[in-house]
């Protein structure tokens, strides 16, 4: 086998590995999250943040990634606003928690390719919102450590299950 053939075979193998790692969740998209449910999820996430004394920004997006609701606690760093929105968009666009991408990057090697995946933010804190077995949007939380962001986002997402 020539070197070129081996490189082509390895590239093809890499594509298949990436496809399995990023394969779509079996859950379909449903109707977009309502403003009432978005507020409810955000309120629960912020309550969890208050318990930990963490300053957070919370964003809820619909199935298309459009912002439905946003709230930021006093004294939360300004940059967390955009990060919360992008975490939510990552979760809804790829039908999985944004932590999946964080873990792939942390693994190094082929996982670093995620850094070039358009629209994927590799930080914990974005969780799909699921109602009646359908993805209706996502919540994104940012402002503290990624594990604290994830705890708050999960609390918000659990509100709607």
Image: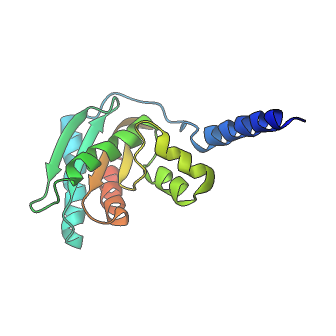
Q: Residue at x 30, y 49 (%)?
A: 140
Q: Residue furthest bottom?
A: 52
Counting the numbered discs, the total is 0
Task: Report which quarter residue 3 is drawn in.
Answer: top right
Q: Residue furthest front?
A: 3
User: Is 16 on the left or on the right of 96, as rendered?
Assistant: right
**Percent position (x, y) of residue 114?**
51, 45
Q: Residue at x 62, y 49 (%)?
A: 110
Q: Residue at x 27, y 43 (%)?
A: 85
**Residue 131 in sight here:** no
Q: Nearer the viewer, residue 75 or 126?
A: 75
Q: Colour scheme of this structure image? A: rainbow
* Quadrant location of the N terminus in the rendered image: top right
Q: Residue at x 57, y 57 (%)?
A: 108
**Percent position (x, y) of residue 152?**
30, 60
**Percent position (x, y) of residue 141?**
28, 53
**Residue 83 in sight here:** yes
**Percent position (x, y) of residue 22?**
56, 41
User: Is 48 on the left or on the right of 98, as rendered?
Assistant: left
Task: Report which quarter residue 55 is drawn in.
Answer: bottom left
Q: Residue furthest left?
A: 74
User: Is 11 on the left or on the right of 56, as rendered?
Assistant: right
User: Is 104 on the left or on the right of 5, as rendered?
Assistant: left
């Amino acid at each position: 086998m020539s070197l070129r053939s081996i490189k082509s075979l390895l590239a093809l193998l890499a594509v298949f590995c990436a496809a399995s790692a990023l394969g779509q969740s079996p859950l379909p998209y449903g109707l977009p999250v309502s403003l009432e449910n978005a507020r409810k999820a955000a309120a629960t996430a912020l309550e969890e943040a208050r318990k930990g004394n963490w300053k957070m920004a919370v964003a809820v997006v619909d199935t298309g990634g459009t912002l439905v609701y946003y709230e930021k606690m006093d004294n939360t760093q300004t940059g967390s606003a955009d990060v919360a929105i992008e975490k939510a968009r990552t979760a809804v666009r790829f039908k999985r928690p944004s932590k999946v991408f964080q873990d792939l990057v942390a693994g190094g090697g082929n996982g670093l390719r995620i850094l070039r995946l358009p629209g994927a933010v590799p930080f914990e804190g974005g969780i799909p919102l699921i109602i009646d077995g359908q993805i209706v949007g996502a919540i994104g939380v940012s402002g503290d450590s990624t594990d604290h962001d994830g705890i708050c986002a999960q609390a918000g997402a659990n509100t709607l299950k």
